[in-house]
Image (cartoon, rainbow, N blue to C red):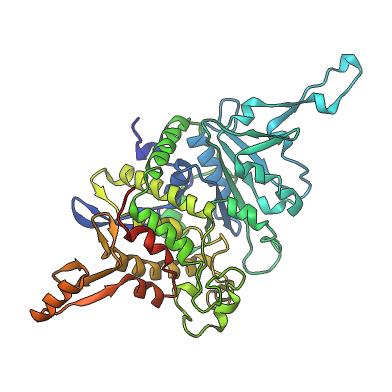
Amino acid sequence: MNLDYQEFQLPTYLNTSAAVTIPCLKDDRPAIVQLTIPDILLASFFAGLNTLLISDTGRGKTQLVKDVANTYFGGFGTEGHANFKKARPNMTSIMDMFEIIDVDTSSGKYNSDQSRLLNMDRVSRLFHAVDELNLAPQVLQAEFFDLAEGEYAFKGIPIRLGRNDYSVCMATMNMNKNGDNGFSGTFDVNRALLNRTHLTLDLDTPKFRPTLEDRDALARRVYLTVKTKNAEPRDLTEKILFAYERVQEITAQESLSVRIFRQLLDDAFSYCDTDEWKDKEGIFPMKCSECTTYSGKICSLTKGCSERTLQAITGLSAAFHILAEMKYGSNIKLKWFDLMLAAFSLTSYHGNLNSIVLSEKYAGRRQLMMDHVISQLKNVCAKMDHHFFNGVLVPKIITNPEITLEYSPEIEGQLRSGRVNFSVMDLEETLRAEGLGTGWIRLFTRPQEF
């Protein structure tokens, strides 16, 4: 099945800013892949991931949701594959999204349990949109756990949503970041629910906003109303399901780089060299504020990711690869480290960042802090690139501008006797200098049997 990039362009929402950039080779020359907010969302659908859009009012969140629903999933009508729920303070349940009440008035009897029936058309839909999530009382927000998990509990029995194991949820939240009227309590949203929204995009982030040219083009469009626009429904669900299957195939064959990156975000970032038990759990970020050894190092800025986040990063990386080929052609080459760095950069709301540094240095701007973390992590990944030999991670290498060799005392002696300038790079020393754990390295430096 052919995946045509132009076919997935949105009709109304306009944003051409390069929200994510990934280095690549095109025709064996250095180039850059630029992905916009619509690109990122399309990749998230390819990967089957939930998304949360947050911003102050007027950034186009609802328009984006409607464009996606109508353009990709055939709309909210009887022939569509999308459900829609607008959260409100008086909301009582999401039952009306998936249930119908069948009452026979002629019998004169009413059994509420027997009258409740599943609306199988709604249950089988692939896309579930929740607008203004944070306007629902916190206790009722738990109702949306089902949507995020791709399930609906009917009479105590979990029912799978969507089809072919595919179901995605997309939600929006208004935020007033100036602290004045309107949106106090925005972050009274259950963290577990936030963690189930695999991507959280803050559309107030400068690089996530439409360009000046985009805003000028939008201003020159002639509309009869300032309300959101509903595009003609189109059904691209089969192509999205096809891309989803490709993502599953790619992630099932994890490369060495993918496996190592997962260990970096898990084991390496969960380690604390100054802790008695060498573990960050329970002491992050408080102890980092007192640490002088690694102050400002990457280990002080973030902790290890949950398994759910690691899976989301892996899937999104594969989807980025597919989308990059759609947008720029199949003659591009991308490194998995770069793809996963790009995916990791969009997890700033998963509770991994140092909240003290976030408040004191970045004024709560999570994406800005995450970008700083990514810049440091890129340096670590670049150094690790030198340690790959024949599908194995070599812990110690000899290098100079002309050679890179696996270390051995014999080679070191020969180079010294030949008066060749060189340096010895030790991977464990490199990671420890950043405060990162190294215990996982043994998984990849022994002979590979798998």
Is residue 190 visible in the rendered image? The answer is yes
Picture coordinates of residue 331 (x, y %)? 23, 45
Q: Is residue 226 visible?
A: no
* As drawn, 47 above or below 192: above
Task: Single out the residue that lies furthest toward the bottom.
Answer: 292
The answer to which of 256 and 174 lies nearer the viewer is: 256
Determine the residue positioned at 84% across, 28% down.
Answer: 112
Q: Nearer the viewer, residue 16 or 287?
A: 287
> Relative to residue 351, is residue 355 depicted above or below?
below
- Percent across and percent down for residue 308 are 54, 52
Q: Quadrant of residue 178?
A: bottom right
Outermost right residue: 108
Residue 121 pos. (x, y %): 62, 26
Taking the image as shown, residue 328 lies to the left or right of residue 230, namely left
Q: Which of the two residues, 282 or 406, is positioned nearer the viewer here? A: 406
Image vertical order of residue 212 relative to residue 237, above or below: below
* The quadrant where residue 349 appears: bottom right
Q: Position of residue 104 (x, y in %)?
A: 84, 17
**What residue appears at the point 36 percent right and 72 percent down from the top-left corner?**
428
Left or right: 417 with respect to 124?
left
User: With 272 as the anchor, is 250 left or right in this view?
Assistant: left
